[in-house]
Every structure is written in C-alpha cells, then in structure tokens.
Amino acid sequence: MFSALFKGIGSSVTRGSTQFIKQQPLQNTLQRQVQTSAYDTTATVQKLRDQLRYYAVAEIAGRPFLITKNDKVIVNRLKDVKVGDVLKLDKVRELGSKDYTLKGSPYVPENVFNINATVIEHTKSKLIQIVLDSRYLRHIKNIVFVLVLLNYWSKLYNTVLIGGPVRAVHDFKTYLMRIVFRQLRRLPAVQEKINKELGTTLAGMEKSMMDKEVGLGSNLTLPAKGMTEQQVMESLHKFEGLKAADWAGGKVSGSIYHGGEDLTKILAEAYKIFAIANPLHPEIFPGIRRMEAESVAMVLSMYNAPSTGCGTMTSGGTESILMACKTYRDMYKDLKGINYPEMVVPDTIHAAFMKAASYFKIKLITIPIDPVTLKVDVKKMERAITKNTVMIAGSAVNFPHGIADDIAALGKLAKKYKIGLHVDCCLGSFIMPFLEKAGFPTTDFDFRVDGVTSISCDTHKYGFAAKGSSIIMYRNATIRKYQYFLYSQWTGGIYASPSIAGSRPGALIAGCWSALMYMGEDGYLKACKDIVGARRIMEAGVRSIPQLHVKGDPIGPVLSFGANEPLNIYDVGDKLSARGWNLSALQNPSGLHISTTLPWVNSAETFVKDLKECVQGLVDDPSSGNGSTAAIYGTAASVPDKTIVDDVAAGFLDLLYKA
C-alpha cells in the first residue's frame, strides 16, 4: 500500500471519498518510498521514528501514511490540524488497487494534503495505535482479562464463603430483579402508576399526622409583635397536650427512657441553670468542662476501662458510632496506608454503621447470624477480614433481638489481625454493667475483653439523662486522637473539635452529670433488676403461647418474638396496637420488639394477658387480621426494588417538616 502511495507522491491521487494532492521534489518522494513497505508497517514506522524524527503518522481509511512536519494538512477545509493527528473516514476498509488513480506531475511547488474526513482524533503519535495492535499488547490484554476475572471470582467466592450458597443465590436473584424493576420504572406508564400509589400512601400518612394537630393554628412567619411569657407558655401546653401514645402507662417500646418525676425535675433545673453554656468555650464555662470529663470518667469506670482509657461525649448513639468508624478509618490510613477501608459487622448491627459507611466511604461487609443463637457467625466474620479491614464490631445488646454477640471471640479476631473492635453498648448502656450484680446471666462485653478497643454507651437511654447525650470510649488516647478534627491553618485561628459538632448544648452535659450523680450505683442496680425482671415476665408469657416463639436467648432489656405459621406476627402487632400497645416491628425475619423501660415494670403482666387474648382471637378468626402494619411490611417484603420503600421513607421525613 505504501509503495503505491509514495510512487504517486507529487501527483494527484483520488480514492473513493478521499482526495489528496502532494507536491514536492521527486528526490524526497523516492527517499520516502525506499523507507516504507506495505508488508512491514510496524518496523518501518519505528525505523522512520528513529532515523527521521520530523516524520509523523496519520491514518486514512484505516491505513497509515507518512507526512513530514513541513507538510501542510487541510481536513474539511480546517487548517488547524497538526502532524500526528489521526484522520478517519466514514468508510474504513482496506484499499485495493482499483480504489485510486495517479494523475499529475511529480514537480509541484507546494506541500499540500487535501483530505475529506468526518472524524478527527488527536493522538501524540500513530505509533501508539501500532503498539496497541502488536502481539505484545495481546499478552497484556490477556493478563488484564485474567486479573479482572480473578477479581470478580474472588468477590463471588467471598460472597458464597461468607453468606453461604443459599444467601448468595438469593442475593443474586434479588440483584437481577432489582435491575429489571429499575428498568421498568423508566417506562412512563409504570412510573406514573408508582407515583400514584406513592401519593396515596403519603396522603394517608399526612392525614394521620395532621389530624392530631387540628386546632393548633399555623405559625409560618415571625409574629409582628412578640408573645408575652404567658402566651408562650399557653402555646407550649397546647403542643404538650396533643394526642400521643400512652408511654407513661408502660405501653410504648423504648422511646422514652424515664427515670422518674424527681429526676425529670432535676434535669429541668440543670437545663435552666446552664441553658446558655457551650463547651466550645471552656474558659467561659469551666464547670461544663469539668462535668463532661467526670461523666466520661464514670462511664469508663463502669465498663472496666484500663488506666489509659478515655473518651468523649456525643449527641447520641449514632454519633458515637460514627465517631468510632471515622476514627478507625483515619487511624489505619495513617498507620497502614489503607486507602480503601472495610469494616466487618453482623447483619443485626445498628443502622448507624450503615450510615457511617455511607458518610465516610467505608466498604461495609455484613455477616449472617447463627440461626439458633442469633449471634454473629464468628467463623464467617474471620473469612471476611482482608488486608483492607480496619475494624470489626459486635453488639451488647443488639436492637432487633436483644442478643449479645460473642465479644470474647471477636476480641481474639481483633488481636489476631491487629484491627479495631468496637462494641455497641448504646442500648445495653446502664443495664449490661449491672447484670452480674443483679444476679442475672451475663457475658463478657467490656474492656476486660482483650481486643476491645472502643465501646459506645448511651447515657440518654438507661442512664436516664435527657435526650442528646452518649459516651464513646477508647482503650487509650492514641486511638482517640484520630477522632478529633484539627485544623491549624484557618484564618479564624486554630480550630479543634472532639466530635462532629462545634458548639454543643452545655445544658445537656449538666443534665447527664446530674442524672449519673442522682441515680448512683444503687439506683442503676435497682433499675436493672426491675427492668430485666419485667422483661423476663413477658418472655415467660410469650414462651407459654404455642403460636409464638422468642428470638434467641436475650439477656438484657430487650424482648423480641415471632409467630409460627400460619399466624402473621404483624397481625398480632396490629391487634395489640388497637389496645394501646406500641411495639416496634422487625423484618428479615418478621417479628415484634420491646425495649423494656421502667414504666413497663407495672404493665408487664397486663401485656402478657392482652397478648394471649390477641393471639387467641386470630386463631379463632384469622380474617380479623390484615391490619396496616401487616400491609406495610408485607408490601415492603414483596417489592424487589427497595428504592420504592426508600421513596416512602423519604416522603415520611418530608412530612415531618411540613408546618
């Protein structure tokens, strides 16, 4: 091809849609002809690059030709095309002898190529394309293909190894269904139907929410004239009087962790005294600094921390968990250079870990629980640990079932692989440390377990402090330092904060300290006996009902139970709800959950009585079920694309901010 091409240089050559005119001395033309060959393109071009540096390569109709840097190239009348550009035509095929004719004289004064092309791609050199076509690249392509194949195979292998073949098949099936469903949602008719159903659901939620607020009026702008103190107080009492669940009567699971009216008065007084306090300014509020430090120290002592133990106060359990995850991410990036961190946690871990993974770009690997004990499968957790794992976690106790994971076994894993181990005691808080003294069965869960490096504990749950306080504890200050945010280059001065928030309400710190001091060890011990005792009464009641079963062997304040087929546990929940009981619904698998609080102490036996009657009513008349909870969770379980459920949840959150 090159021979024919350069014989005609200095002539006019027409090839299909390509026409170029080359005009230059015949001597140069012959020199090029000698240097080129149609049968050894790679070697020839490389030789030209080595010997004649001013040569570059272009491409016409998929075949290369050479031009010098002195040649002027015009493509589609565009004069800014440079030597080294790759020129491609519409019809890319190998040219034959009938595709061109030679015309003109070899002696023409100017160096001009005139090319009609439709696509222009710029590359540094056509040599790049030649290398891509070489046999060496084929080996590279094969190597890359094998590496990609190994990567996907390892992911599949780990999925089967960790979750088991049944779960792997189920996850794959769910994944495929999700893809199909998402594509269906792109169809206007399908999306219109979804939007209609979503609108109906949200309208029902809005009506349920707004019906409770009838007669309140609406304040969407600042009042032109401020209210009097009496007017403000009257409005507050109206808000307080809105219809709500009977938490004081011991019919609401968790939610309100009430320590008694006397403690509530103390908390209110503490808030009044320190309403304007801000721990961001310890020089202005030294008392707040002292109370925060003492609150952390008391909880550390309760969890048997070593002398090096330390911690900080946060706004709640979620922030405590977020801080722990952020700490391990930063620490192992610094110490081990891990840029793609992973954390391995049980399926039953609190959703705050999922939030942390999303916020801090940590890969989350969830491990199945044992179907009998409902504790995390330690062997599968070990299989999931990789060189990028920065932490593992366990619960004492978890929210869904009130089960404590085998923290001692997890501690051994953490020590073996030199990674962090966080124990989530946010719910167990001030119950777990007192189980042994109260005479109840317990397990190893605190800093006495070698390998535990951090623990989160909510003081605003069974510590009975006002909402908005939790403690995150570390084995030593070296770990805690990675929680801090430090910035010394800010124009506003040196900035440092221990947790997410900058300014924080000092009144909550004062309230937390007040609750700890008022309750004391004896108060928390009595609360533990009463609360766990009430849970045991309800557990015995559930076990006495043949249609129900208790999930696992709970040791703390939580009771979780499910129904044996054909009974639907959500129908049981709806019937209990009709009697004023407010329980939490569980899914995957379905169940009902009670976080036992002090008000339940006086209502535990009544609950068992009502539960038995509700179950018997469903046995006698199965059609009496099919309530709202069963409908919601039944629909959620049947929808392959959970983004629809997410849309409902997002709509609910939107309603919370509708005035």
Image: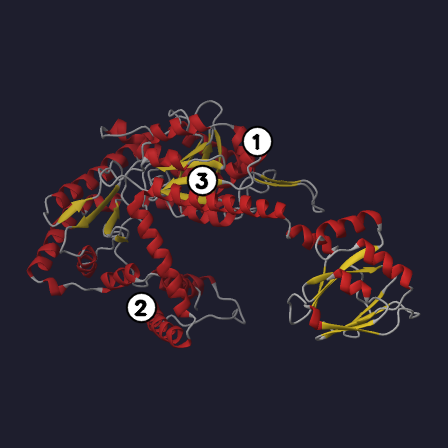
Pick the front one: 507 or 262: 507
**Mark 2 belongs to which amino acid?**
Ser
On residue 335, the disc is 1
Residue 4: which quarter of the image? Answer: bottom right
Check if mark 1's residue and mark 2's residue have beta carbons within 8 Å: no
Residue hosting label 2: 208
Nearest the viewer among 525 and 370 is: 370
The image position of residue 372, as x and y in percent, is: 22, 39
Q: Which residue is mark 3?
A: 343
Name the N-terminal-most of marks 2 and 3: 2
Q: Gap in Å between the C-alphas at discs 2 and 3?
A: 40 Å
Q: Secondary structure at mark 1?
A: helix
Question: Marks 1/2: CA distance?
Answer: 53 Å
Amino acid found under the numbered disc labelled 1: Leu
Q: The disc labelled 3 sits on which kind of residue?
A: Met
Q: Is residue 215 above or below residue 307?
A: below
| Callout 2 touching callout 3 (CB < 8 Å) | no
Q: Earlier in the sequence, mark 1 or mark 3?
A: 1
**Residue plotted at (43% across, 68% down):** 658
> Along the line of sight, which residue is nearer the eye, 154 or 284?
154
How many residues crowd mark 2 within 10 Å: few (<14), some (14–19), many (20+)?
A: few
Colouring of the image: secondary structure
SS under mark 3: strand
